[in-house]
Image: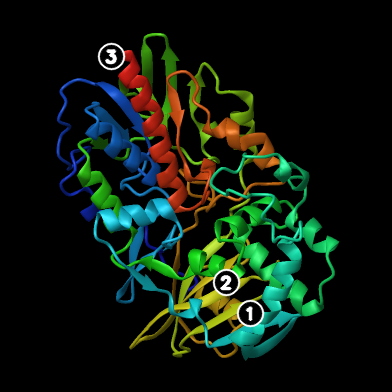
Amino acid sequence: MANKNKKQLPQASGAFKKAVEGVTVQGSSKVSSKRADDNYDVVIIGAGFAGAIAARELSKAGMRTLILEARERPGGRTFNADFNGARLEMGGTWIHWGQPHIWAEMRRYGLDVKESIGATPEKTNWVVNDKLIEGTSERNFEILGNAYKKFVDVDGQMGRTIFPQPFSPLLNNNYKKFDSLSLTERMKEIDLSDEERDVLSSLTAMCCHGDPDKAGFLDMLKWNANAYYDVGVMWDMCARYKIKTGTESLIQAILEDGSADLKLSTPVSEVRQDINGVQVTTALGSTYKANTVVVTLPLNIIKDVSFFPALAPPKLASSTLGHTGKGTKFFVLIKQKVGRWSASAPYPRRIVAAWSDYENEQGTTIVCFGPQGLVDITDRNDVQSALREILPGAEVLDVTGHDWATDPYAKGTWCWYNSNQFTDSLAALQGAEGRLHFASADSANGWRGFIDGAIESGLRASQEIKAKYVVENS
């Protein structure tokens, strides 16, 4: 007998209908491509933020540009979905004016932000030694602040000597001595009280969105440096502000600002390059030729496309290893109105972090994060059981989410490197190979794993190509 509480979760399909209006799109029931032939100056693989930015920049430079997108929508690991009267961010969500690339885009297109109400909580629950404490946010943040300082202060300067210029992470070699440490190993090095240990465990598990035993400690130092070496600022940058009209409004604006052709539902299976150019073949057998290609595939997906000649071994090895971000993110509507509320629990609890996202007449919608596979988000009873571990008496009315870990075009959430992966992979993932240029949030210098990082990398790749294009055609 089927569980009556199981439900069909919203799919990405159709969520970005507005995002392709006014954009030249080729595909079923879409506007035909402007070009009668399949030859382009640039083919961009992927219509996430990295691909959209590169397409805008290169098409504005006069280059004939085509974007091939595997999904039925643009946006990559971001999309909006309706949920009980609100538009949710199912993937990448929070932004901040301290993230320079996305903030420049926000100002460019006149967009504004709104807040997740629980990011500045009035009430906070946290689990210590399997016991729930219902306290004040001030006390919780005091515990976290003390633990966090011990955790990242590896040099007596809160990590400033490791990443003195965080958007130039390879500026010196100081980072290398910490790259072999996992988050768990670093926690074992420092003296923490039980409360500090479990509250810090929640933060690290949420940040890496995976297993802290494998996740690299160096990425914590990197986030810390990005956020001006301050945990409070980091929280605001990573969990508080969202685009008021949704990420779909920004991707729509970027796409409409360029003149690239966009072909949806077109996964790429093979890329071949030689001295004459590049041929890109889709899973359905169509081929497109270009002078150069921008590959914006997520790190965990690069290995799934055949490249001839083969990609550099470090790039392929990093993709085969993958990053740690494979946890769950889901939204729960509860009957109670809890206001500005948050909670934390140590890894591997079913929900390691949660906070209220918004309230309406139906109740409170809470965003939850946890390890992969520990909560069945299609089963309302299972979700309610997990949520009651951190919010006793919660009555769950509805649940939604997207399983990015099994999504065939993502195979993970945001990027957090494994131990040693920063040293072994970052420069290699950024490096051009012949006529192929690479752009992804997963290889950004600054806010890697964030929308800001995707935009940064798209700009970098377009700059590389424009410089080469001008030289070749001068």
Q: First in sequence: mark 2 or mark 3? A: 2
Disc 1 to disc 3: CB gap under 8 Å: no
Q: Residues within 10 Å of mark 3 (few under 14, many from 20)?
A: few
Q: Which residue is mark 2?
A: 232
Residue 199 rendering spot, x and y as whole percentages: 70, 74
Horizontal relation, residue 365 to residue 315: left or right:
left
**Separation of residues labelled 2 and 1 (CA atoms):** 9 Å
Residue placed at 65% from the left, 42% from the top?
422
Give the structural element (helix, strand or loop) at label 1: helix
Q: Residue at x 50, y 57 (%)?
A: 403
| Residue on which the image places disc 3 | 474
In the picture, the quarter occupied by the C terminus is: top left
Give the labeled residue for mark 1: 141
- Mark 2–mark 3 Cα distance, whole angstroms, equals 50 Å
Q: Which residue type does callout 1 highlight?
A: Phe
Earlier sequence position, callout 2 versus callout 1: 1
Q: CA distance from mark 1 to mark 3?
A: 58 Å
Task: Note whether 68 is above or below 181 in the view shown.
Answer: above
